Image (cartoon, grey):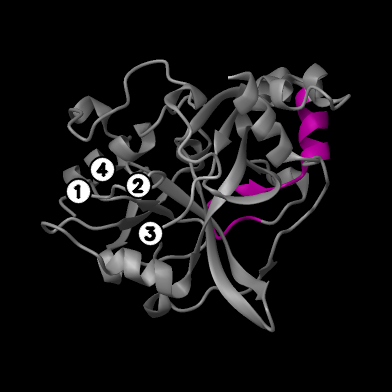
Amino acid sequence: MQTMRICILSILGFWFLEGSKSFLLTPPPTPSSFLRRENLHNKFEHASSCLYRSKKPTSSEEDGNDKILPEGSVRFLGRGSDAIVRPGCVLVAPSNEFHHFYRQSAIFVYGMGEVPDGEDDLYVIRGLIIDHPTPFTLAEMMEHNPVVPNNPLGSNFLFRGGDKGQEGVILLHNQKDLGQNEIGMSGIFEGGWQAALESCALDSKETKNFKAFFNYCEFTEQELEDLLSSSEDGDSWASVEVQPSIVLDPDWDRGDAWSRLRNSLKQMNV
């Protein structure tokens, strides 16, 4: 466990940098140009289950009606190649997805834009798995930072957003007054670390409004297009819009959000 913790620390690096953006956001393309991903590599070479915080067994898709999300909290945007993908949506994996990270996952799309790729720019879509917690808090992972361990925000658990990226931790929140740009029309904002720490220092209850992720998922247009167009037994990836509280829920265990969303879609008969 100690070795694993050191590995994570080395990946996180100096994340406490205000306003750092890993790629240039551009207006999203039309829905017809969207997309998928399959064969990503786990930075920890498929780390053991001890990496993940788990208070109870992983939820299954077979959960009953008491495990659906509140009525009106989910808006269906399409399934398979007809799914609309835009910043602020959540991609819900099918039951037959067996990729190490994407299996039973719900991925919040937080950015779409161009990144340098040799002589050309490559258009990519980036997302965060919202229900993949680690057993570590921000304070534990940033104990060398003079501010975080002593701030209430440091008690928040760190989530693993995917298997790409070594540039630091991504902060999501629902605080419009922190001066950050909204992601699509999701009611969720990215960044504003200094303001977040100040807000939580004044009122420890504010920590529930923030969720931190290290690493992210990344897809090229073709990869995501392939992902969405795949189908088995009539089951495929779906796209939805959800309330901010679903993305920011700090208590999701592995697969929890996925299970609730899948059951909600079944109730909607889509």
Is 196 part of what is drawn in magenta? yes
Q: Which residue is drawn at 53% across and 48% down?
A: 163
Give 225 or 63, whichever is nearer the viewer: 225
Q: Badges 2 and 1: C-beta atoms under 8 Å apart? A: yes
Identify whether 129 is placed above or below 205.
Answer: below
Q: Which of marks 3 and 1 is nearer the N terminus?
A: 3
Q: Which mark is residue 74?
A: 2
Mark 1, other Cα within 10 Å: few <14 / some 14–19 / many ≥20 = few
Q: Give the range drawn in magenta.
A: 182-200
Select label 2 or label 3 by which is in front. 3
Where residue 97 sits in the image (x, y, percent)?
A: 28, 50
From the image, state whether disc 4 or disc 3 is nearer to you: 3
**Residue kind at label 1, given as amino acid type:** Met
Residue position marked by numbered label 4 in the rendering = 262
Tag 4 or tag 2, which sits nearer the N-term?
Answer: 2
The amino acid pointed to by label 3 is Glu
Task: Identify residue type, mark 4.
Answer: Arg
Mark 3 to mark 1 CA distance (whole Å): 28 Å
Q: Residue furthest left?
A: 233
